[in-house]
Image (cartoon, rainbow, N blue to C red):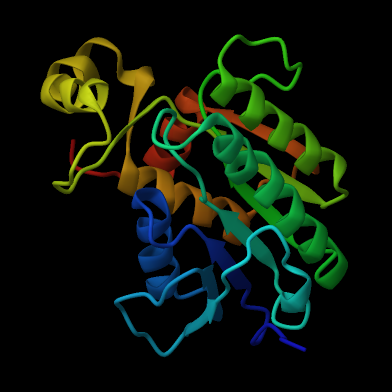
Amino acid sequence: MNVSTAGQPRLVILGATGMVGGYALRYALEHPAVARVTTIGRRKLSISHPKLDEIVHRDFADFSALAEPLSGQDAAVFCLGAYTGAVPDSELREITVDYTIEFARVLRIASPAAAFSFLSGSGADPTGRSRLAFARYKGEAEKALVAAGFPHVYIFRPAYIYPVEPRKEPNCSYRLLRAIYPVFRVLFPNQVIRADELGHAMVDVVVRGTGQSGGVLLENRDIRAMIKSLHPFPQ
């Protein structure tokens, strides 16, 4: 069984090859309060670090085989996701809802005291009434996580996530948003957040805690306020 080192937490990160998850991973590895970081992904990462444990796992529909490495974890940072339109609707639901619930099921059994930091999205609708599939699926995942029994669930609902580093944008809308980001940030500051800020906040909240139990909902404004108090970033 994994055991925290001298009270330092052990974190497991899903989605570490993605934009937000990549920042969360790098930050967690350099965080002095974090003892170990375990990543779960379908392929190997391109980095190495003495605090890093990598697990290559192909079947995200079944995490049962990972009960042992998931034991003794203090927190999970779940950044797995897909862009709307990038995959068929059935696959979007599988990634957004089914993978989240299955991972949470195994983690809850293996590490019942773990905190859970979940990357949702602005507009997520736990009532299931939204016309947007993304909103319904993220809301369904949120609802399942809150009901799973973890002592602390932190639900992050960012609006537009600014990539910071150059990348190939997934569609025209994202290319436009990136182009107008400097103006958009000034006019609508609570509708944008940097990817590095978001990744850091998702790690910080499970390392430091908030004292609140159950599900804690963090909208874009809340995330910005949190990160500003901890790590002022250049804008």
Residue 231 spot, x, y in % from top left: 35, 49
> Is 68 on the left or on the right of 205, as rendered?
right
State whether residue 124 appears in this view.
Answer: no
Could you tell me which residue is drawn at 82 percent across and 52 percent down? 150
State whether residue 56 appears in this view.
Answer: yes
> Is 154 on the left or on the right of 224, as rendered?
right
Between 162 and 175, the one nearer to me in the picture: 175
Could you tell me which residue is drawn at 52 percent across and 73 percent down? 33
> Is 231 on the left or on the right of 15, as rendered?
left
- Snapshot quadrant of residue 225: top left
Residue 164 against residue 76 in the figure, above or below: above
Residue 41 against residue 128 in the figure, above or below: below
Between 76 and 185, the one nearer to me in the picture: 76
Residue 196 spot, x, y in % from top left: 32, 49
- Snapshot quadrant of residue 60: bottom right
Between 84 and 179, the one nearer to me in the picture: 84
Residue 214 against residue 36 in the figure, above or below: above
Total count of labels: 0
Between 125 and 42, the one nearer to me in the picture: 42
Assign the C terminus to one quadrant of the image.
top left
Could you tell me which residue is drawn at 38 percent across and 73 percent down? 30
